[in-house]
Image (cartoon, grey):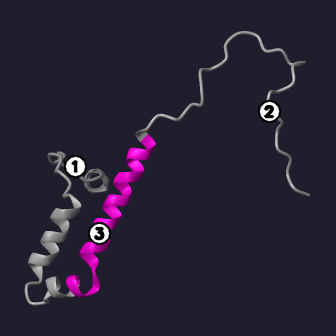
């Protein structure tokens, strides 16, 4: 009987922990919110003067402007030189302009 009780006790202890219900999804903080929280946590460090001295804010603005410009360039359609040629192509015909050769 004691062997059976020890077996039941061992099986009860060997089971894994009960799964906890998942918490609701938390919204991620944006970069400006993270920066503001870090600055609020350390009020006596004179961070504004250091930023102005080292130009952190200006560098941040340049990076965002460059990223915005790159996104706009990616969104622009490619430039075409003329209407696309449709139909069959005659391979025996020579091109109108000679192809420049590479220097040797």
Question: Going from the N terminus, do you reach mark 2 or mark 1 first?
Answer: 1
Which residue is at a point 32% across and 73% down the rendered structure image? 59
Disc assigned to residue 97? 2
Name which quarter of the figure residue 46 lies in.
Answer: bottom left
Q: Which residue is identified by label 3?
A: 60
From the viewer's perspective, is the residue at label 3 or at label 1 nearer?
Answer: 3
The label shown at residue 90 is none
Inter-mark Cα distance, 3 to 1: 47 Å
Residue 55 placement (x, y as % from top left): 27, 80
Q: Magenta segment, principal secondary structure?
A: helix
Q: Is residue 33 left or right of residue 66?
A: left
**Where residue 63 sits: x, y (%)?**
35, 65
Query: Which residue is located at x 13 percent, y 70 percent?
Result: 36
Which quarter of the picture shows residue 85?
top right
First-in-chain label (2 vs 3): 3
Q: Residue tagged by mark 1?
A: 18
Sequence order check, earlier mark of 3 and 1: 1
Task: Give the alpha-carbon distance from disc 2 to disc 1, as whole Å.
Answer: 77 Å
Provide the residue span drawn in magenta: 51-74
Quadrant in which residue 90 is drawn: top right
The answer to whether residue 3 is visible is no
Does the magenta portion include 57?
yes
Drawn side of residue 17 relative to residue 33, left or right: right
**Is label 2 or label 3 in front?**
2
Residue situated in front as seen by the camera: 72 or 38: 72
Front in this rendered view, residue 71 or 22: 71
């Amino acid at each position: 009987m004691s062997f059976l009780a020890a077996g039941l006790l061992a099986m009860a202890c060997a089971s894994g922990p009960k799964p906890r219900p998942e918490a609701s999804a938390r919204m991620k903080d944006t970069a400006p919110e993270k920066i503001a929280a870090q600055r609020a946590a350390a009020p006596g460090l004179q961070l504004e003067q250091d930023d102005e001295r080292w130009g952190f804010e200006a560098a941040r603005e340049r990076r965002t402007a460059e990223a915005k410009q790159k996104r706009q360039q990616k969104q622009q359609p490619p430039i075409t030189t003329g209407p696309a040629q449709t139909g069959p192509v005659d391979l025996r015909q020579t091109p109108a302009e000679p192809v420049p050769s590479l220097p040797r």
